[in-house]
Image (cartoon, rainbow, N blue to C red):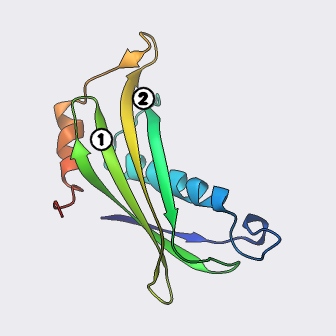
């Protein structure tokens, strides 16, 4: 799985003292963008849109914790792929949240989905998770 670390900032917490649920989507986005970049899926122009996203919150997360976000591909389609993301608290190793999303390659000039190239498919398949 592709992996990054996120340090939880004070401004990401709410009045209850834990990370506000909206920020988990920001963490997933940060990991997703780094995933795209590290795989070389995005060049000068951004060519992907988010079609669907979901997140399950399993444990509370607090200021000054470090999260490890692991991203892996669960399905590669003609013009889209499914990404699974797991967020772990670095020190304890506990799974704190897990999310999934559907990402579509998009042709903005024609305003429709565009097929993934052979190179894109190959890159995505290097991070494809085994079926459960």
Badge 2 density bin: few <14, some 14–19, many ≥20, Cα 10 Å: some
Q: Position of residue 40 (x, y in %)?
A: 34, 43
Residue behind mark 1: 81
Decide: is 50 above or below 127. Answer: above
Q: For the point 50% across and 57% down, which residue is it?
A: 55
Front position in the image: 97 or 44: 97
* Figure disc tally: 2
Rendering quarter of residue 57: bottom right
Residue 111 place in picture, x, y as percent: 44, 13
| Residue beneath the point at 64% across and 61% down | 21
* Mark 1 nearby-residue class (10 Å; few <14, some 14–19, many ≥20): some
Q: In which quarter of the image is the C terminus?
A: bottom left
Which residue carries the number 2 mark? 47
Q: In which quarter of the image is the N terminus?
A: bottom left
User: x, y (%) of residue 114?
Assistant: 31, 21
Residue 9 in percent (x, y) is at 71, 70
* Residue at position x 51%, y 73% in the image: 58
Q: Distance between the residues labelled 2 and 1?
A: 13 Å
């Amino acid at each position: 799985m592709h992996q990054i670390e996120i340090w939880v900032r004070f401004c990401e917490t709410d009045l209850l003292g834990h990370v506000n649920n909206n920020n988990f989507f920001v963490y997933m986005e940060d990991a997703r963008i780094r995933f795209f970049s590290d795989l070389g899926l995005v060049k000068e122009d951004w060519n992907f849109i988010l079609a669907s996203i979901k997140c399950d919150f399993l444990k509370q997360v607090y200021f000054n914790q470090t999260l490890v976000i692991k991203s892996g591909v669960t399905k590669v389609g003609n013009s889209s792929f499914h990404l699974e993301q797991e967020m772990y608290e670095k020190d304890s190793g506990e799974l704190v949240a897990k999310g999934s999303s559907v990402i579509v390659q998009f042709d903005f000039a024609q305003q429709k989905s565009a097929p993934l190239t052979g190179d894109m498919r190959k890159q995505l398949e290097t991070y494809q998770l085994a079926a459960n």
